[in-house]
Amino acid sequence: MMGERDRRNLFDVDGRVIIVTGASSGLGQQFAHALHAAGAQVVAVARRKDRLDRLAAECPGLDARPLDVTDSAACAALVEDVHQAYGRIDGLVNNAGVGTPAPAIEEDLDQFRHVIDVNLTSVFHLSRLVAKPMLAAAQGSVVNIASIYGLGSTYPVGDASYAASKAAVINLTRDLAGQWSKRGVRVNAIAPGFFRSEMAEELFTSEKAHQRITLATPMRRTGEPGELDGAVIFLLSDASSFVTGATLAVDGGWSSH
Ligand SMILES: NC(=O)c1ccc[n+]([C@@H]2O[C@H](COP(=O)([O-])OP(=O)(O)OC[C@H]3O[C@@H](n4cnc5c(N)ncnc54)[C@H](OP(=O)(O)O)[C@@H]3O)[C@@H](O)[C@H]2O)c1
């Protein structure tokens, strides 16, 4: 049973060692800031070192390390190094992602494979790499950043590789949760709605696109920076201790109709 004292610390991530991928911009950068502000030992990874250096300068103590998530050997080395450095890994936020809308007839097969590699295969690989020390410690939380486009199609945009990768991330989340939860490692996903970022920029600069997405969103607006902080902290903290295999939509109601 949870005591008064534990309840006061329900959302505590203080001191937890949490790896955030794709932390050089957009949602990942925001997650790194939020988790750092909440007291976590954040290990922020992405390819652009200059961006990571800037993030580290803004967040004293944040550990920034360059990583291409499609480089499987580099991922293994990173997880090994982080485990060596801190003696444990408490959380992983699989946030790195790419999306380049294209009509299916025209999408280059190599481009399709690349999207699957970044958005899905790296999530599988990094998750099982961190799961080893987490399962040994019988505790850990993996949070996969899916998308509302994993809950349905991207209509009328047209981005088959992205939609396929994000739907697969949602079922990968369920399967890994099924395999690891009884041993203390929870796996969940967040399905964000529309947030301004490098990837989503066009949706914000095109008046027509912006109007279309806000009209399809019951709250009649897009997400503000920081409106995913609560979801990620919830899933990484003990507040979600009985939540696993779930996908939490944070989308102003977009997926509710
Ligand atoms: N913004 C939205 O409305 C929205 C909605 C639903 C879901 N999402 C998801 O949220 C996540 C973040 O996207 P965002 O919107 O914040 O877009 P973003 O600003 O373009 O950020 C994408 C991040 O992924 C990293 N990345 C891409 N390829 C990588 C690779 N091979 N290795 C390591 N890192 C890589 C990028 O860093 P480097 O280029 O420095 O490597 C960057 O930090 C994605 O998974 C996206 O699908 C976003």
Image: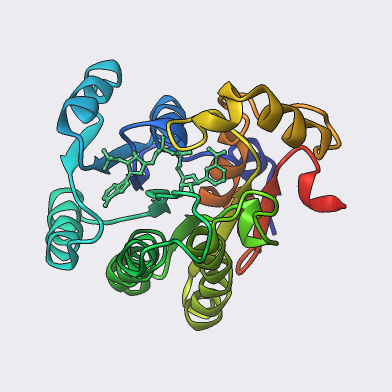
In the rendered structure, the answer to whether residue 86 lies left or right of residue 4 reads left
Q: Residue furthest bottom?
A: 179
Q: Is residue 241 left or right of residue 199?
A: right
Identity of the residue drawn at 80% across and 37% down = 217
- Measuring from the top left, give residue 185's x and y in whole percent: 46, 68
Image coloring type: rainbow
Residue in the image at 61% along x and 61% along y: 150
Q: Is residue 38 above or below residue 89?
A: above
Q: Quadrant of residue 65?
A: top left
Looking at the picture, does residue 29 appear above or below residue 190?
Answer: above
Q: Quadrant of residue 174?
A: bottom right
The x and y percentages for residue 44 are 28, 39
Q: Image height check: is 73 above or below 20?
A: below
Count of number-bearing discs: 0
**Residue in front for this viewpoint, 112 or 27:** 112
Viewed as shown, does residue 62 lie left or right of 243?
A: left
Residue pictured at 34% horizontal, 59% vertical: 118
Q: Is residue 147 visible?
A: yes
Whole-percent x, y for residue 172 in the image: 51, 74
The residue closer to the viewer here, 100 or 88, is 100
Q: Percent x, y for residue 24? A: 31, 33
Q: Quadrant of ligand 1?
A: top left
Q: Residue at x 20, y 52 (%)?
A: 68
- Above or below residue 236? Residue 129 is below
Q: Is residue 222 visible?
A: no
